[in-house]
Image (tube, rainbow, N blue to C red):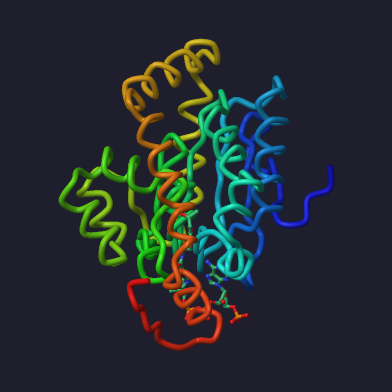
Amino acid sequence: MNFEFILVENQYAPQIALVRLNRPKELNALNLQLMLELKKALQDLDEDEEVRCIIITGNQQAFAAGADIKQMENKTAIDLLKIDQFETWDQIRKTKKPIIAAVSGFALGGGCELAMTCDMIVASETAKFGQPEIKIGIMPGAGGTQRLTRAVGKALAMEMVLTGKFISAEEALKAGLINKVVPEELYLNEAVKLATEVCAMSPIATRLAKESVNKAFETGLQEGLFFERKNFYMSFTSEDQKEGMSAFVEKRKPDFKGK
Ligand code: CAA
């Protein structure tokens, strides 16, 4: 399959696959096609016997600035329900091989959620993590309220989700959201170093261990995600969603009416 919005590379080692999100002009905003391509690439890499660890990255400016607001702007809750984009996210979560997110720049909304769906996160000093959906009149829909809260605890998660504020890589490290912070020029190398350590272990044990850690992390998560999804769709019934997204696209301040 030829991909338009991602690149799959293996320049570091045959056992390490690098998947690069590649919509630089849009700060790697995650449109539906990009997510389908990512799902397909991860399925292929999961089946490739040579590959033992996968790195997902963006570029220095952005890991991903969230789901594509322009694509969502005029959607209704029913449109979203029918598109069922979260089935793609569920498949990504089911990848059996370990995935490291190598994050530089913005990891916002769906971008932060994608990084959190990975197994470990290595960040550049310039990385910024956030769930700013509230600023466009909606709420996180791809695990943000559940995974962020489990990772950093209620206080910080609530603050980030309710105010949309970004946190720095250092803050994310302190809060337990990520594994490492390194200077910008080293973040990809650091991810490769971590991947190399992982690749040295038994692939079977690695698969079983990943599954088990996720089990501990995810007990009760399904229920939470189901709940979150309903509320995410519900947010698209509001005028505030239309206002928030139009304001973003028109580059003006939103005027939320609470309707
Ligand atoms: N969707 C669509 N386009 C986006 C985008 C997004 N999430 N984020 C950035 N872009 C586009 C901008 O529209 C802009 O395009 P144009 O040049 O055509 O105008 C281009 O990328 C560059 O962005 P900015 O000019 O805004 O760059 P900046 O440096 O001034 O600001 C930013 C960077 C703070 C990340 C800002 O772009 C921003 O706030 N982006 C939106 C972040 C956001 O709200 N993410 C959540 C999306 S909803 C979601 O993810 C739902 C979910 O849970 C599944």
- For this orientation, the residue located farthest to the front is 259
Q: Residue furthest left?
A: 155
Query: Residue 190: in sight, yes or no?
Result: no
**Residue 108 makes an appearance in the image:** yes
- Between residues 141 and 51, which one lies in front from this camera angle? 141
Residue 67 x, y percent position in the rendering? 54, 59
Q: Position of residue 20 (x, y in %)?
A: 63, 51
Question: What residue do we see at 50% from left, 86% from top?
Answer: 251
151 or 90, nearer to the observer: 90
Q: Could you say where residue 62 lies in the image, as x and y percent from the top left?
A: 51, 64
Residue furthest to the right in view is: 1
Residue depicted at x 36% and y 78%: 256
Residue at point 36% right, 21% down?
213
Residue 215, image quadrant: top left
Determine which quarter of the picture holds residue 253. bottom left
**Quadrant (top left, top right, bottom left, bottom right) of the N terminus:** top right
Location of the C terminus by quadrant is bottom left
| Along the viewing direction, whichever of 11 and 93 lies nearer the viewer | 93
In the displayed structure, does residue 7 sit left or right of residue 197?
Answer: right
Question: Where does residue 168 sit, x and y in percent of width and height?
Answer: 29, 62
Q: Is residue 220 above or below residue 27?
A: above
Q: How many marks?
A: 0
